[in-house]
């Protein structure tokens, strides 16, 4: 499995719009086991995204989907920056039993 | 919902043992929607744990369960430290539709 843990910051006043966009963009992509979007309670501009994919290739392929490309184009002006993004190797746990 | 994103470091040579213990300890706890354990590919001692709970009270209650207390006692000598642990407010996404 391939995982990503990232924290991004929205431009002023745009966190909710960006959050909704991320939520809409993530409906059942091939190879995606988990994609969770969260507010940061300590920073009103920040959004956490944690992802688990079958493998890195599935994640990479998703970025070329027309719907994902469209979402990225729509999101870009609302993103002020990324604090970080870490790659992980998920080993298992609870909530990964999607097909 | 209530989320946690944390990175811990195992004592030398103990990452796999600690990882297995975390995986075994996380089988369907009340209020737990998601609990994913991952290796850090860039640091052979590091483990990421991302959690989503119905609310903070469910998470707090889980820490008092005898099985969780036993797992914590077993894990403690294998934990060298925590790099960080962030609280989040998960808004939704994919892979959260457990009962």
Image (tube, coloured by chain):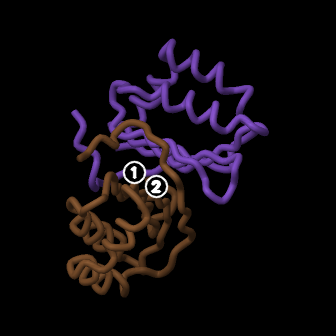
Chain colours: A brown, B purple
Q: How crowded is the residue under tag 1: few (<14 C-alpha within 10 Å), some, or many (20+)?
A: many
Q: Is residue A63 or residue A50 the one in the foreground?
A: A63
Total marks placed = 2
Residue at the image point whose x is 25% and y is 78% from the top: A65
Q: In this view, does B45 lie to the left or right of B25?
A: right
Callout 2–callout 1 Cβ contact below 8 Å? yes
User: Quadrant of the rendered structure where residue A70 is?
Assistant: bottom left
**Dot 1: chain letter:** B
Q: What element carries label 1?
A: strand
Residue at the image point whose x is 32% and y is 52% from the top: A33
Q: Is residue A20 or residue A42 the one in the foreground?
A: A20
For the C terminus of chain B, the quadrant is top left
Q: Residue B89 carries which label?
A: 1
User: Which residue is outermost to the top?
Assistant: B66
Residue receiving disc 2: A41
- For marks 2 and 1, give the CA distance: 6 Å
Percent coordinates x, y for residue A34 in the rendering: 33, 52
For the N terminus of chain B, the quadrant is top left
Q: How crowded is the residue under tag 2: few (<14 C-alpha within 10 Å), some, or many (20+)?
A: some
**Dot 2: chain letter:** A
Percent coordinates x, y for residue A45 in the rendering: 45, 70
Asked if labels 2 and 1 share a chain, the reply is no
B54 relative to B75, above or below: below
A12 relative to A31, above or below: below
Q: In this view, does B59 lie to the left or right of B47?
A: left
Percent coordinates x, y for residue A55 in the rendering: 41, 59
Residue at the image point whose x is 64% and y is 50% from the top: B84
Percent coordinates x, y for residue B74 in the rendering: 65, 20
Question: Mark 2 or 1, which is nearer the eye?
Answer: 1
Residue at the image point whose x is 45% and y is 24% from the top: B62
B36 relative to B32, above or below: below
């Amino acid at each position: 499995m391939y995982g990503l843990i990232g924290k991004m910051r929205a431009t002023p006043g745009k966190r909710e719009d960006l959050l909704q966009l991320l939520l809409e963009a993530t409906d059942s992509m091939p190879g995606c086991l988990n994609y969770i979007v969260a507010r940061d309670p300590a920073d009103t501009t920040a959004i956490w995204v944690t992802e688990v994919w079958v493998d890195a290739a599935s994640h990479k392929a998703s970025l070329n989907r027309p719907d994902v490309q469209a979402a990225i184009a729509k999101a870009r002006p609302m993103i002020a920056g990324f604090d970080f993004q870490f790659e992980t190797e998920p080993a298992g746990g609870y909530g990964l039993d999607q097909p």
